[in-house]
Amino acid sequence: MPFSFAAFIILAVAALAIHGQQIPHAPTTEGEIPDAILGEAGAPRGGDLAYFDEDQATRGYLAEPEGPGPRGAVILIHEWNGLVDRVRQVADALAAEGYVALAADLYSGRTGSNRDENMALVRETLADMDKIIRNLDAAAAYLRSRPDVNGKIGAMGWCYGGGVALSYALGGENHDATAIFYGRLLDDPERLSAIHHEVYGTFAGLDRGPSPEQVEGFVAALRQAGVENDVHIYDDVNHGFWLYVERDPKNEEPALDAWERLKAYLKRTIGSD
C-alpha cells in the first residue's frame, strides 16, 4: 500500500507524544467512586502530547486504554490552575472505562500556584477565546485521526474548564457530548440552540458561582432551545466537590451519583467498546 501524506501527518503527531503505558480495562463497579477523585490514585500512567502546532509550549496529557477499539474519546478541560495531576488521574480513570482521554492544556504548559496566578491565567486565556477553540479543535482532530477512535468525541471540564466546555459546544468543531461541572453558564435560548447534542451538568447547591438560580436559568434556556440535558444540583455540597471528594465526607454520596450519571451519559452519547 502507498504511504499517504495523511498517514505521515498522523504518525508525525504521534511521535510528539512522550508515551506512557496503556491503561488496563478496569471500569468501576456499581457503587464505586474512582480513586482519581478521592485523592487515592497513583501517579499518572499516560504521557504528554504536543497536539497544537500553533503553540509549541502546549502539552496535553494522553491516556490510552488497552485494546484496539473502536471507542469514544474525551477531551478533559482543566480548572483555573491548569493541567495538574488530578486532571491527569481522571483521564486515566476514563481510559480504564474504555475511552481515549486527552487532557487539553490551555495555559501553554503553565500552572498557577495561588489565586492571583490562577486568575491571571484565566483572564489571559479567556481574552482570546478563538485560540482556545482552535486548541480544542486540534485536540479533537488528533483524536479523530486515531484508528482506535470511533469518531465520537465528548468534552468535559470543571469550573473554568466547565465554562470553556460550554463555549466549545457553541463554537467548536461538531462533537457529540459536553459535560459541565460547576462552570460559567448562559441563559440565552437562541445561543444555546447551536448545541446539537445532549448536555450533562453537575452543580453544587451551596455554590455561588454558578448559583442554583443560575443553573435553573441555564436548564430553562436549554429546554426552550430544545437541547436535551441531564443536569443536577446536589444539595449541601460546594464548588469543587466532585473533583476533590476527599475534602469533605459529605461529598461522597453526591460524587458517586454524579460519576454514575457521567458514565451512563458518555456511554449513550459517544459509546465505548
Image (tube, helix red, strand yellow):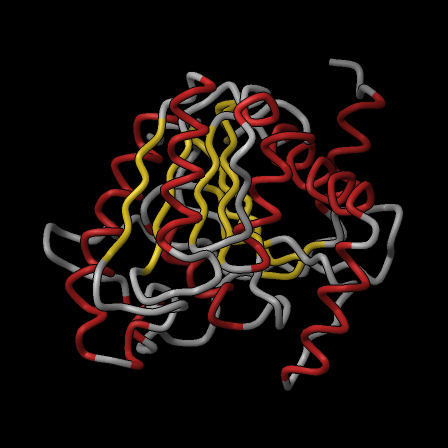
Query: Looking at the image, is 6 positioned above or below residue 79?
Result: above
Residue 167 position within the rendered picture, expressed as x and y whole percent measured from the top left: 63, 39
Q: Residue at x 68, y 58 (%)?
A: 105
Q: Residue at x 59, y 61 (%)?
A: 47
For residue 117, side relative to residue 177 (left or right): right
Residue 168 occupies which quadrant of the picture?
top right
Residue 124 point in image, percent of width and height: 81, 63
**In what quadrant of the picture does the C terminus appear?**
top left
Residue 81 locus on image (x, y percent):
62, 72
Q: Quadrant of the N terminus?
A: top right
Residue at position x 42%, y 60% in the image: 90
Q: How many marks?
A: 0
The answer to which of 153 and 116 lies nearer the viewer is 116
Answer above or below: position of 182 versus 118: above
Q: Nearer the viewer, residue 84 or 14?
A: 84
**Residue 61 place in picture, x, y as percent:** 60, 58
156 shown above or below 175? below
172 with respect to 270 (left or right): right
| Side of 113 relative to 218 (left or right) | right
In the displayed orientation, state which residue is furthest to the top.
1
Task: Please identify the residue farthest to the left as the structure is shown.
Answer: 31
Side of 91 where 164 appears, left or right: right
Residue 244 drawn above or below residue 18: below
Query: Would you identify the image quadrant in which residue 250 lies?
Result: bottom left
Corner quadrant of residue 244: bottom left
